[in-house]
Image (cartoon, helix red, strand yellow):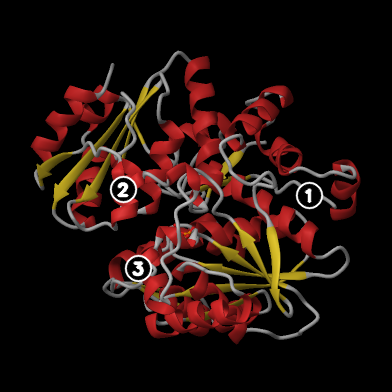
Amino acid sequence: MRYLSTRGQAPPVTFSDVLLRGLAPDGGLYLPQQWPTFDISDLQKRSGSEPTYQFLAGEIIWPFVEDTFSRKELDDLIERAYATFTSQRIVPTKNFTENLWLAELFHGPTLAFKDIALQLVGQFFDHQLEKNSERITIVGATSGDTGSAAIEACRDRDAMDIIILHPHGKTSEVQRRQMTTVHASNVHNIAIEGNFDDCQNLVKAMFRDDEFNRAINMSAVNSINWARVMAQIVYYWWTAMQVAKTTQVSFCVPSGNFGNVFAGYGAHLTGLPVNKFIVASNTNDVLDRFFTTGRMEAQAVAPTLSPSMDIQISSNFERLLFETLDRDGAEVESKFENFRNEGFLAVDQSTLTQLKTKWASSRVNDEQTLKTIASIYEETGELIDPHTAVGIAAAKQNIEDPNIPIICLATAHPSKFPEAVHTATGIKPDLPPHLDNLHQREEVFSVLPNNLEDVKEFILGKARR
Ligand SMILES: *Cc1c(COP(=O)(O)O)cnc(C)c1O
C-alpha cells in the first residue's frame, strides 16, 4: 500500500514514511491510495468462536502496513500494545437503553480513547527506529489527554525521548498527575507559564527552526498522524460485529479534532455498513455548524466541561473533505487557502445534501451535559464522563429509526473528570486500581517561562543524541 497526500502534490510514500513523518511535504495529510475492503461475515468466520480484538486488529491493519512489517511482526506489536489494557476485550460494549449502546474506549493506561491508537503507534515507532538505528525526540503540547497518552506510549523506550509542554496550573489535577508522576528517564514534562496556545506556539516555532529540529531529530505523535487514525478503524468493526449481527449500525462520536469519527468513516470506506455518523460537539460547535450549513468557520475557543473537545480547528476534517471532493487535491488546497485568507471554507449545496445522507450532528452545552450524566445515572446506574455525555445527548437527538442500534463511543473514564461527574450526581468516581495512588505519587516537572530560547535550551540539555 502506498499513501498519497490530501493536497495532491506529494509523491506517494510507504507506511513507514507516513508513520515517521506525520504531515506530507505539501502540507496535506496522508491517506491510503486505495481503501482495502473487508466483509463482515468473512471477518466473523475468520475470528472463530472466541473472537479477540487483537486478532481483528491484525486482519484490518495488515493491508495498510504490509510494505513495512511482516505479519508476524505486526501481530507481535499488536499483542504488546494491548497487553497494557485492563479489559480483556479491549473495547467492551454494553446495551444501556433501548437501541443505544456504549463502546468503552477507556480501558487503557490513561483512561481515554487515545491510548488505543497511541499504545500501538508507540510500538510501531520503537520498532521502526530500532530497525533504522535512528533516535528521535518527540515534542508535543497538550491541554490534557494527548500528553499523558503519548507519555505512556513512549516511556522507557531507548530510541525516543519525549518532552511534553502543558500550561502551568491550567490542566485538571488528574490529567497533570498522569503526566508528571511517570518516572522514566526519557520522559520530561515542562509546565509553561502561559496558556495552551502559548505551548502550541512554542512547539510550532521549534518545528519551523530547521537547525534545532535537526539537532534533536524532532518528531510528533499528533492526531493528524495516519497511523493513529488507522488503529482506530479497528474498534468500529469490532463494536459493530458485537452489536449487530445482521443490521446496519450508526455511531455517535464526541468530536474535537475529528480524528476519531474520521476513523469510523474509514471503517465505512473499508466496507462496514453504517447508517449514520452522528458528530457530537460541545459549545465549540464548528463541526455542527459545518454539517448544518456547509460552511466551516472557526470562532474563539470557549472552555467547557468537556475540555478535550474545546477545539475550533478540526485538523482531520481535511481527510473527509478530500474524500467528499472525489480526492481532488487541488480543490482541497484551494478550499484551505480560502480558510487561511478569508477565515472560512464552504461546500456547495449538492455536496452538503450528499454529506447529510451519511452525517448528522448536534451541539450540546454544559447544562445539557450535566443533565445527561445525571439522567443516565438515574436510569441505568452507570457513571459517564462529560465527553461521553455530550455524545449520548447528541445520539438521543438523532434517533431516526429505533431498529438501528446507535453505538455511542465512551471516550474517557468517568474518574478522569471527577468534578463534573460529582456536580451532576453527587458521586466522586474512583480511579481504577492501577491509578488509585495517583494523588500520593511524587510529581516531577520543570516550570519554564513562555520563552522559546529557554525551552530550546532545556530540551537540548535533555534529548539524548
Ligand atoms: C481527544 C478526545 C476527544 C476528541 O477526539 P477527536 O479525535 O479529537 O475528535 C473526545 N473525548 C476525549 C475524552 C478525548 O480525549
Which numbered disc, 3 or 2, marks the residue that appears first in the sequence? 3
Tell me the quarter of the picture where residue 268 sits. Answer: bottom right
Q: Amino acid at mark 1?
A: Thr
Which numbered disc, 2 or 1, marks the residue that appears first in the sequence? 1
Tell me the quarter of the picture where residue 301 sits. Answer: bottom left
Q: Amino acid at mark 3?
A: Glu
Q: CB of residue at label 1: within 8 Å of ligand 1? A: no
Residue 350 lies left or right of residue 431; in this view the side is: right
Q: Are marks 2 and 1 in contact (CB under 8 Å)?
A: no
Mark 3 or 2: in front is 2
The answer to whether one can see residue 103 in this image is yes
Q: Are marks 3 and 1 in contact (CB under 8 Å)?
A: no
Q: Secondary structure at mark 1?
A: loop
The answer to whether one can see residue 226 in this image is no
User: Residue under circle 1?
Assistant: 37
Q: Is residue 280 above or below residue 63?
A: below
Label 2 environment density (alpha carbons within 10 Å; few <14, some 14–19, many ≥20): few
Give the x, y percent position of residue 281: 46, 74
Residue 397 lies left or right of residue 313; in this view the side is: right
Give the x, y percent position of residue 456: 15, 33
In the image shown, does 159 or 81 lie closer to the viewer?
81
User: Residue under circle 3?
Assistant: 419
Kindly identify which numbered label has been placed on residue 8. Answer: none
Q: CB of residue at label 2: within 8 Å of ligand 1? A: no
Give the x, y percent position of residue 329: 52, 55
Q: Quadrant of the N terminus?
A: top right
Mark 3 or 1: in front is 3
Q: Secondary structure at mark 2?
A: helix
Q: CA distance from mark 3 to mark 1?
A: 43 Å
State the residue at coordinates (64%, 59%).
264
